Amino acid sequence: MESLKAGIQNGADAIYLGGSSFGARASATNFDNDELIEAVKYAKLRNVNIFVTVNTSIKETEVEELISYTDFLYKTGVDAIILSDIGVAEVLRKRYPNMELHASTQISAHSLNDVLELKKVGFNRVVLARELSIEEIKEICDNVDIDIEVFIHGAICISYSGQCLMSSMLGDRSGNRGRCAQPCRKSYKLINKTTGKIIDVNGSYLLSPKDLCSIENIEKILDTGVKSLKIEGRMKRPEYVAVVTSRYRKTIDNYINNKITDDKKALKEDLEAIFNRKFTSGYLMSKNGSDIINLDKPNNVGVKVGEVLSFNSKKNKLKIKLSGKLSKGDGINLGGGNVGRVIKNGEIFDFGVAGEIIEIDFMKNIKSKTPVYKTSDKLLVDNANKSFIEGIENKKINLKCEIFIKVDEKAKFILENIEVYSDEIVEKAKNKGVEIDKIIEKLSKTGGTPYKFVFDNIFVDKDVFVPVSVLNNLRRKAIEKYEEYRLDFSGKRIICPYQHFDYPNGKKVFNGKITLKVHKNSQLDKILENPDISEYIREIYTEDFNLLEEYYNKFKTIGINLVYSALGVIRNEEYSILEKYLSKINNEIFNKVQISTWGSKNFFKSKFGTKKFNIDTYFNIYNSYSLRFFEKYFDAEDITISQEINKFEIKSLLNKSKEKNANVDMIIYGHTRAMLTEYCAMGVLTKDCHKDRRCAECARSDYILKDMENREFRLFQDIFCRTEIRNHITLDLRENINEIFELGVDRVRLDFTYEDSDMVYRILKECVEYLKYSKKFNYKNVFKGHYINSVN
């Protein structure tokens, strides 16, 4: 609650927060229901909106609980719900006609096509992926009539949000469920797999991003036409929220009011002092991410204020040459703790400034030339805390009012069209009457409230007598009634009954039991050469244009459909590039396409006449509502469910989906894509990033990231130099294949990445033998993903 007050009192127009359930920051100190009611009251009375995060993937068994919770949010007066589960969004859109729905950054909207599709299915606002540039954001804003929101400050993910399974695959904490263990903040080595060489990059936190800071680029961001600027702060202290909000508020207001100032440097220094992992402008101003990683450390860096000169072990004094201000009570990096006394030439002071040599009390030796960083600034924190103490109202809301005081009538006070009357009849004064100015003065004493009265109409008889107590009571009653009105949502918010929407009419198309995804032609050759396995395969997916052209007809003749698998991210300009390349290929090939981005459907339908779609796993389908959504709105012939639900949750999902027409697919083999990121560790860290990938080091060698537990994560790149980080261990559920079909799954999929042709054949042959004979193979320590144990 303190953080919410800090944000509002320092200029926030809206607060996004997590409630007791279903938010993407489950480890944060979230609001219980009583606190949420108080938060809405506090915000509403100050004309501030409340947006509640329900931006996690929802399991089938949680849907009823979720609807009960969102009913509570709706009745409480929450202004919008932030969502990432498309099935849930479809339910809530019909259930709450007066509630705004915002598409979370977890939904991974990264193109104009994505935003147009999300608007079409009912979202009122889209929070864009953090990877977009200023130019891309402007293009989106110029071409949509929907609110656009962008992040401007705080922690950022190295992976596209909603596209990261790293934490999930290394344990049971899923980022899609709000419980990310932050493996990106751990230490890694970059290794050239071809040569075995460890790349020396002067640091080990190879996936740990700096904090986003946009204070120097606010004008450019506002000029794009975005509706909302978002500050990440749900897991930060109240003083952090106060400082960051107030500095951006000042910068924004200065620009809007055409006030030219030169104080951005000072404002940025305050932002650095309150918390930073080093700052970056992120992808807003640069596309290659070369400045996005802090290799040195994954937590607060602080602000450099000096360098150690020497340590006096007899007096326990540390001598420092200052390059910035250091004060009593400030925190420093040298083992933690706060500065006690600041000693200059034997005298005690409250602070020292740049250029001075000081001594502080210290208990252990620190080497000379060790840099000194201030990790907390006492004065900054104290001033921030003062900005939201109880009773402080930094911004008053103007309320229009009128006063009518007539002899022999009750005094009437109108506040924003709300009328109240005095209990007493106004009398004529025996001596001199009350002056109008005095009446206005008494009525205007709104201290301790967020209001300022602006009088539009004043009518006071001459020589009236009105006791101060009457005026005070009028003001009190008016404010009480006004607040009752502002907080009364009864009758204003309609809840519509909602049931499962019907499946589209159609006939189920069953395409066989096994599908594949491949990355190279040698994997396809082995299938063509072995009819004993190819007869069980009906579809193969690939992202490679060349494989499509070369192999489509070959597989068509043996009854296997070769399907183009569109990329997991397609940015604005990339659609044009794809169209150029794909238009050279026979349109028949695109009769069906596998997609994993929101904007892909309309692109392929309009450009290539695509009629059928395979919905890939990266839409994070957890529940039957999402299945229905994709079948109804996306012409889905096949839908691949999430890799994060266990067999009991799969069964529950499919039991609610018995009338479906689409095939339900499930991945049972492969090195799971753990991350999808714009950041290219190979190019940036080896300093060998070329526009022509054929010349780059990453095209000539294989690279891996190795963590402290010696787990190796293979790195791949797509045609736009976007990096996939593959899980260190192979998912293998082949021995469970018959059980999986008994759950109701229609088809199983094997994903081949760097397997050679012989390995592809062996894996497929064993899979077929499981299927035909339930044959057992003696595998030990097989990784089954979340099939047995679900994510939290």
Image (cartoon, rainbow, N blue to C red):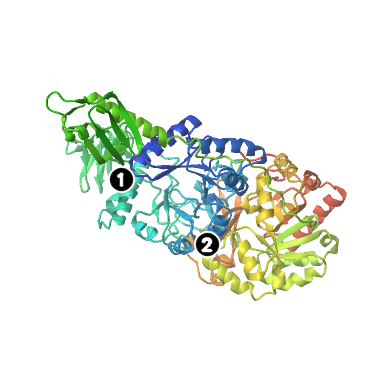
Which quadrant, please, contains the N terminus? top left
501 sits to left or right of 97: right
Residue 112, numbered circle: 2
As shown in the figure, which amino acid type bears the numbered disc 1? Ser
Which quadrant, please, contains the C terminus? top right
Q: Secondary structure at mark 1?
A: loop
Q: How crowded is the residue under tag 1: few (<14 C-alpha within 10 Å), some, or many (20+)?
A: some
Which residue is drawn at the image coordinates 66% and 70% (left, top)? 608
Q: CA distance from mark 2 to mark 1?
A: 54 Å
Q: Position of residue 726 (x, y in %)?
A: 62, 54
Q: Nearer the viewer, mark 2 or mark 1?
A: 2
281 sits to left or right of 450: right
Which residue is drawn at the image coordinates 27% and 23% (left, top)? 424
Q: Position of residue 679 (x, y in %)?
A: 51, 58
Which residue is label 1 attached to? 368
Looking at the image, the residue that sits furthest to the bottom is 584
Up-down relation of residue 19 to residue 124 (above or below):
above
Circle nearer the N terminus (2, 1):
2
476 sits to left or right of 757: left
Q: Position of residue 264 (x, y in %)?
A: 29, 54
Q: Position of residue 708 (x, y in %)?
A: 55, 46
Please give the count of numbered marks on the rendered protein. Answer: 2
As shown in the figure, which amino acid type bears the numbered disc 2? Leu
